[in-house]
Image: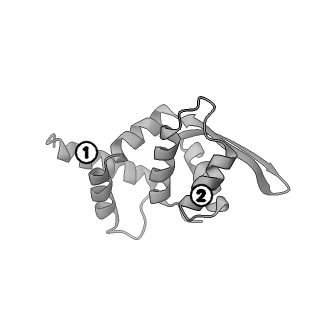
Amino acid sequence: MELNHELIRSLLLFVESNDSLLGVSDDQLRDFAKKQNVSYEQLTYVIRRLEEKDIINAYIQTGSNIVVDMSINSLTFDGHAYLDNIRDPEVWKKTKSVTSKLASVSMDIAVKVASNVVIKMLGLD
């Protein structure tokens, strides 16, 4: 399954905007997937990868090889740092422009590109 960077950004913004200390519930994630026009399975894949990368704290319960319940408790410190670099629509646009020159780019590279875009925009390069 493909790791969708646009979905990652949208999901992180969604999680951050949630005011509940309990995090984002399974029902909210299902609604989010519909609004983003992605399957629940695609969203689950992204959530698992973000948890592996220590970008979010998530809970995923499975049974009979399917996801029964899933929630995102919060962004991690690294998750906030990554989101801070890609939050601005202009930074995100320039990051996508740079990374689109290749067929695919890892999340680590996307993070570095976004950081470099921010540094250039601030005139610190």
Q: Residue at x 60, y 49 (%)?
A: 47
Split into 4 quadrants, where in the image is the N terminus?
Answer: bottom right
Q: How many marks?
A: 2
Q: Residues within 10 Å of mark 1 (few under 14, many from 20)?
A: many
Residue at left offset 22%, top offset 43%: 119
Q: Residue 91's spot in the image, x, y percent?
A: 28, 51
Q: Residues within 10 Å of mark 2 (few under 14, many from 20)?
A: some
Can you identify the residue that label 2 sits on? 33
For marks 2 and 1 on the same chain, the one whose residue lies earlier in the sequence: 2
Q: Nearer the viewer, residue 32 or 71?
A: 32
Identify the residue position indicated by label 1 in the image.
Answer: 118
Depth check, mark 2 against mark 1: the one in front is 2
Q: Quadrant where the C terminus lies?
A: top left
* Coloration of the structure image: one colour
Residue type (three-letter) at the residue carrying disc 2? Ala
Q: Say whether residue 62 is left or right of residue 37.
A: right
Where in the figure is residue 10, as x and y percent of width and height? 47, 52
Amino acid type of the residue that numbered disc 1 sits on in the rendered structure: Val
Residue at image position (53%, 33%) is: 19
Res. 93 mark: none
Question: Looking at the image, which residue sits at the far top?
Answer: 21
Measured along the vertical axis of the image, is residue 1 above or below residue 30?
below
Pointer 2 with pointer 1, Cβ within 8 A:
no
Q: Secondary structure at mark 1?
A: helix
32 vs 16, left or right, is right
Q: Where is residue 27 shown, x and y percent of the image?
A: 68, 48
Q: Tell me where residue 76 appears, x and y as whole percent.
A: 51, 34
Callout 2: SS: helix
Q: Residue furthest right?
A: 64
Q: CA distance from mark 2 to mark 1?
A: 29 Å
